[in-house]
Image: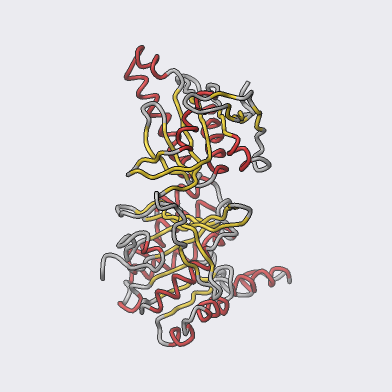
Amino acid sequence: MPKSIPVPLLGDLAPAGFVYSGQYIVLFDADSLWYETSLTIAAAALRQGMKTEYHVFQHFPTEAIEGLTGMGVDAKRLEAEGLLSVWDSYTATTEFESSRKADRGWEETHENPLDIVQGAARWIERTKAGYPPEEKGWLHLDDNTGIFLQYNDEKTCIDAWRTAILPAIRARECPHFLAFPRGIASESFYTKFEALCDGIIDFKSEEVGGRVERFLRIRALRGKTFDSRWQRLQLKANGEVAICATTASPEGRRLAAIMFTDTVGFTESTHRDEAHALEMLRQQQDLIRPLVLDFHGREIKSTGDGLLIEFGSALEATRCAIEVQRRIFERNKAPRVTPIQIRIGVHLGDVVQQGSDIVGDAVNVAARIEPVAEAGGICVSGAVREEVRNKLTNPLERLPPTILKGLQGPVEVYRVVLPWAH
């Protein structure tokens, strides 16, 4: 069995990045293109002669077959030949729901295919018995694994995956792509499930220039190299999804939301107790970095006592800044902790990639806006305000016209009003 599997579409972003026996989690917005992308991957894999399993949780099996057929795949023939297997966890559950309305118990109809405890027991038995060669090496895709959470609690799902399903995936040597909508579970569930996986893939939708655009990115692949940038997706007339060619200028210029953070009083703290100041800085950055990933940001570099971070969305950048300040505020309320305070500035504008660094107007302006913020506060530019107004619960308070060092003329700056700030 080869160590890696050439997963269509995603493999372009991570050559040799996906492995047989790998478990990968897809996190998707409800209006993103995960379902269409999953069928696109399945169709391309089948064209390449790869054995493919497609697991439906919220579509009838015939819908998946019709979708693949529309993409030019003879799905019915491939099913008959044993190269395509459609797993159905939808039909029975819809019958289950109708039987409940008729006041009949589950036991009187049939077994619930989404009872994860029963399923885990079967997987354990089969794994102990061993899998024959014909059951190994399948590419497995779920349309919406999150349906399990409608029938099982979060802890039961995590325990079943860790003790039964993941060992079965490893034993079958079948790469599994498991898909969960965002917002249906606790933050703890997503964190624990991601920790079980070999990679994390994000799908999102975003309004850009008055129209909705769809994106994907690979956020993590354990021990592999990959392109982590957001990729714009295009839906073709036959239902297939393609990654759009980059729209950056020949100089590599692109629009980005830039966040600068800075630690208040860091220099003075290092003069008093350098070791303690550095430990506080480490704690601060350990708090910020996971939140940057949660809001789909990318850390560019440390600036000594702060961070330079890039986001594809001004709204994501601002929401991340608010959550960072909230977490620091909550931390500072704990007894016997040394308070931490930071300032944050956010601007939206052009950047140019230079190696691993970025330069450009957005970087310069964000760096100048950050010092305008109060300790524990956030300031954003007028460009950011135009993108996020009416989308935030936090008011934006306009500051007097501000002259920023190194920039010509006054700049519109807004303070994000934080409910815990005095």
Q: Is residue 84 above or below residue 264?
A: below
Residue visible at 53% across and 36% down in the picture: 347
Assign the C terminus to one quadrant of the image: top right
- The residue sitting at the right extreme is 102
> Where's residue 176, x and y in %?
41, 65
Q: Nearer the viewer, residue 276 or 381?
A: 381
- Is 227 positioned to the left or the right of 90 in the image? left
> Where's residue 54, x and y in %?
47, 73
Q: Is residue 50 above or below residue 146?
A: below
- Is 45 positioned to the left or the right of 69 in the image? left
Assign the N terminus to one quadrant of the image: bottom left
Residue visible at 32% across and 44% down in the picture: 355
Residue visible at 45% across and 78% down in the picture: 85
Q: Nearer the viewer, residue 405 or 415?
A: 405
> Where's residue 150, x and y in %?
59, 59
Q: Is residue 238 above or below residue 295?
A: below
Residue visible at 26% across and 65% down in the picture: 3
Display colour scheme: secondary structure
Residue 150 shows up from this direction: yes
- The residue sitting at the front extreme is 408
Q: Nearer the viewer, residue 114 or 198?
A: 198
> Where's residue 162, x and y in %?
40, 56
- The residue sitting at the left extreme is 2
Q: Is residue 419 above or below residue 258?
A: above
- The residue sitting at the top extreme is 272
Residue 331 shows up from this direction: no
Picture mark count? 0
Q: Nearer the viewer, residue 280 or 366?
A: 366
